[in-house]
Amino acid sequence: MYYNHNLRTDLQEWKNRLVRADYNQFGNQLKYFFDNIDNNKILKSIIDESIAKYPFTDEYFKSLEYYQRYFDRNFENAEQQLSYTFQLTKFFFKEIENYNLHLYTYFSGHPKDNMEEIIENIVTPIIYYFHDKLDKSNSIIYLLEKYKRRVEWFTRKELAEKYNTAEKEYENLLEEDLRLFLFDQGIDYPFSTPKSASGRGDIIGAIETDNPLIVEIKIVDKNKKYRIDRIKSGFHQIVKYTEDYTKDVGYLVIYNFDKVRYDFKFKENNNVFPPMLIFNNKVYYFIIIDMYSDETASKLGSVEKVEITEDELIKK
């Protein structure tokens, strides 16, 4: 189960609690809704990035003065609406020094009507934007998991033979295989040509869209002296690429040719696929493709386990 899917479900439940809340509990549930966003690293990173791009000051909100000017407005895009709505609500909380917005004159009617307006004009747009962002990320994760299964179940032997007989450019060979798969799955222009200040990402697709695909490929193979340091360097490269392109998600695909099972020990919940690390308000996913054997589990024997901690990866 993907972490993002669970988070999408949580968002809907938080909204449902507001819908079910009575007059006396509505403020508590509104506080719960915004506290949950602030305390979730993925949602907070989305919010922080939108605010950095579209900041609004308390002085600006004070100049609006009345309800129609708060909500009767047009936005450039959904991200600007998210930023405006979130900052406006935080402004309200500071002004009234509590969370009972439905009791105040920021809205147009009876407190019961105000509760509906808060859900419609504040909570719903925020959730819609989060859903869109999480769905886009999930679709990429789904494709990368599908590619992982495709290789491990069907094409591993053929791909490993090409890799073992190649004399150089080993990563390019594997990159070509992944690019072809992504193109067949509908990812436009999954090519590695765009160049940033930090170099070239292995695969950067649709870089000018709101949902670019930025992938770094690394190989772990003791026969070629490609060790765990390759995973660490790959992480730092993908961090640089996401910063250079001002994007909030990156993917590290690791082709593992050693009989080793890598266990990522991150602070986030990693009982879901794939392992996820949040660093500098950006999200990074780690997809390992096991290439080390075509044997069945019963014939494979013991597999060494190696833990990789969050601190190990972040440390330069």
Image: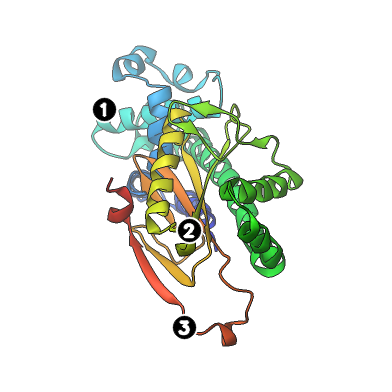
| Residue of label 1 | 95
**Foreground of the two, 225 or 95:** 225
**Foreground of the two, 182 or 276:** 182
The residue sitting at the front extreme is: 167
Q: Which mark is residue 302?
A: 3
Can residue 106 be spotted in the picture? no
Q: Residues within 10 Å of mark 2 (few under 14, many from 20)?
A: few
Q: Residue at x 41, y 35 (%)?
A: 240
Q: Is residue 92 left or right of residue 144?
A: left
Q: Mark 2 and mark 1 in contact? Answer it, CB < 8 Å.
A: no
Q: Secondary structure at mark 3?
A: loop
Residue kind at label 2, given as amino acid type? Lys
Find residue 226 and report its horizontal and vertical position in percent: 44, 57
The label nearer to you, 3 versus 1, is 3
Q: Mark 3 and mark 2 in contact? Answer it, CB < 8 Å.
A: no
Find residue 35 and report its horizontal and vertical position in percent: 33, 46
Q: Quadrant of residue 66?
A: top left
Find residue 120 and report its horizontal and vertical position in percent: 53, 36
The label nearer to you, 3 versus 2, is 2
Q: Residue at x 38, y 41 (%)?
A: 44
Residue kind at label 1, given as amino acid type? Glu
Whichever of labels 2 and 1 marks the residue nearer the N terminus, that label is: 1
